[in-house]
Image (tube, helix red, strand yellow):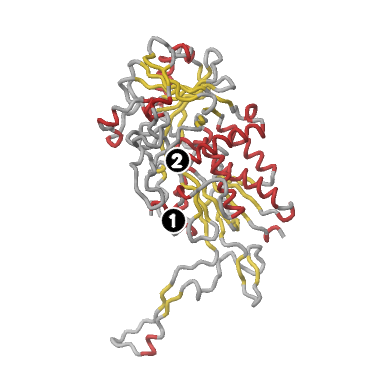
Amino acid sequence: MRSERETIVIIGAGIIGVSTAYFTAKRLAEKYPADKRPRLVLLEQCEPGCSASGKSGGFLARHWSDGTDTEQLARFSYDLHAQLAAEHDGAEKWGYRMLNTFCAEIDRIPVTPSKQHKSTHHRSEAESMVTSIEVIAPRSRRSSPLATTMEYSRPASPIEDDVHPSSTHASIAVPDIETVKVVEPETVPWLRTNVLTRLRQVGDTANTAQVDPLKLTRALLAEAKARGLEFVRAKVINVVEVGHRPPIIEFAVNNSSQCSAADEKNFDIVGPSSAPATTSFLDADSPHSARDGLGRLQPKKPYMLQLDQGIDIPADKIVVACGAWVTSCLRWEAFRDVSASQIPIQGLRVHYLLAKPKYELPAQAVFAEINGTVYSGEDAIEIYPRPDGSVFVCGEALDDPEMPPHNPFEPIYSKRATGRLKQIVSDVSPALSFDIIQYGLACHLPVHAKGIPVISKVPNTRGLYIAAGHGCWGILNGPATGLAVSELLVDGQSSSLDLSKFRLDRWN
């Protein structure tokens, strides 16, 4: 019977969850015949890629994490993107292509930010001396970890730990300034040369690329479904560990001031070992339970997911990959031993718009900094022409991370912020005095307080996993994360990546 097979459930259909589903479905199809293949289920309460995974620039950089904890992850995943594109015609299906990438320093133009930095975002004098190129390009391992990162979250200071005492806990490092070069303004012909004070190339077609993240997410989902994945649109209300009961202290009430030896025997501590392993959904006719050799009812699977539709899904293994909403698992019973300090992940609200330029633009990405304004460093305006003729523009990430709304479809954008984006790009490029395709858009990037993601099994559990907190590099690092988690699920360990830097209990 199908209920006797192993069941794996992935929660969240963003790039991390879908990549995990894709590689898990692929590995299961290769390892098991169809009649013995474990059941694989992907849960999503909205639409695939409905938040950051469908509303980001899709920029890929192979070398921008060099010297940091995510170097191996980023390099491996960049190469994996190329393999996926070659295998599934990614150039046609999700706009995969190589890019030349530039940092443009723009002369001061009349700009009033939609919202100034909060007090926690004020730069120190030392930070203010770091130029844009020192922020977004790679560095050598020996350089100082002084500056901010291209992550939209504020960078974490270097922290000593027992495993990686010299690691820099940030996603993008301070660069080796010799690795970048100043180029002529005409190199990017669609920028206004009269406002361009300096143009530097920080990536080329050997190490930077792009995808349309929504198309990528849905293409990988289609491939996974073709290999047996079940997609269910539902919200998880709770995850219960079947048979678990917290210790209960039972005692008899005696009003006398003295307790006899017989009375003392009435005091009993009942723990999981002595409590009957029964729950409301276990009965003789339930497909979720079976009788053991003594005729006692026993659950077939260790976990039960309770959904908002009134449906329960029994599971052997569960992966939580719901981005900025990952802390929802802290309310689920089976995740009782996970603390908020282990997943300090919140949503950083970023605004964007999608436009059609006056003419087709070359395969060039630009990080535009405006001198004398807050639009610099990790708050540069990012401009990505796409092969379908559209231009993706994002920025205005000037708030502190926050808890996103429960409904990912709830409007969160600032009309003034998206208006500022349109004004800025119109001021810096004659080609970008454009017609808007989509306007008034925003999403929450899942940022980790330490600047690195969690990719880990929950310690001391039978089959709980968390993969989240990738920040603005979720699209880049999604495929490698999905492959590594699929190896954890199917093989019990990851053979492609060393995940020790991303373990859940690293910061205990």
Rendering quarter of residue 246:
bottom left
Q: What amino acid does circle 1 point to?
A: Val
Q: Does the image show residue 433?
A: no
Secondary structure under tag 2 reads strand
Residue 341: x percent and y percent? 38, 51
Residue for point 51% across, 29% down: 59
Which residue matches tag 1? Answer: 338
Q: Does the image show residue 156?
A: yes
Q: Please state the total of marks drawn on the protein image.
A: 2
Residue 148: x percent and y percent? 35, 34
Of the 4 image quadrants, the one containing the C terminus is: bottom left
- The residue nearer to you, when weighing 223 against 97, is 97
Residue for point 61% across, 30% down: 94
Which residue matches tag 2? Answer: 446
- The residue nearer to you, when weighing 410 against 298, is 298
- Whether the residues at callouts 1 and 2 have beta carbons within 8 Å, the answer is no
Q: In the rendered view, does 151 fall on the left or right side of 79? A: left
- Lower sequence index among marks 1 and 2: 1
* Distance Cα–Cα, label 1 vs label 2: 18 Å
Of the 4 image quadrants, the one containing the N terminus is: bottom right
Residue 106: x percent and y percent? 37, 17
Rendering quarter of residue 403:
top left
Q: In the rendered view, does 426 fall on the left or right side of 239? A: left
Residue 456: x percent and y percent? 49, 51
- The residue nearer to you, when weighing 330 against 65, is 65
- The residue nearer to you, when weighing 274 against 210, is 210
Decide: few, some or many residues near mark 1? Use Cα within 10 Å; few <14, some 14-19, many ≥20.
some
Height in image: 154 above or below 336? Answer: above
Q: What amino acid does circle 2 point to?
A: Pro
Height in image: 450 above or below 64? Answer: below
Decide: few, some or many residues near mark 2? Use Cα within 10 Å; few <14, some 14-19, many ≥20.
many
Secondary structure under tag 1 reads loop
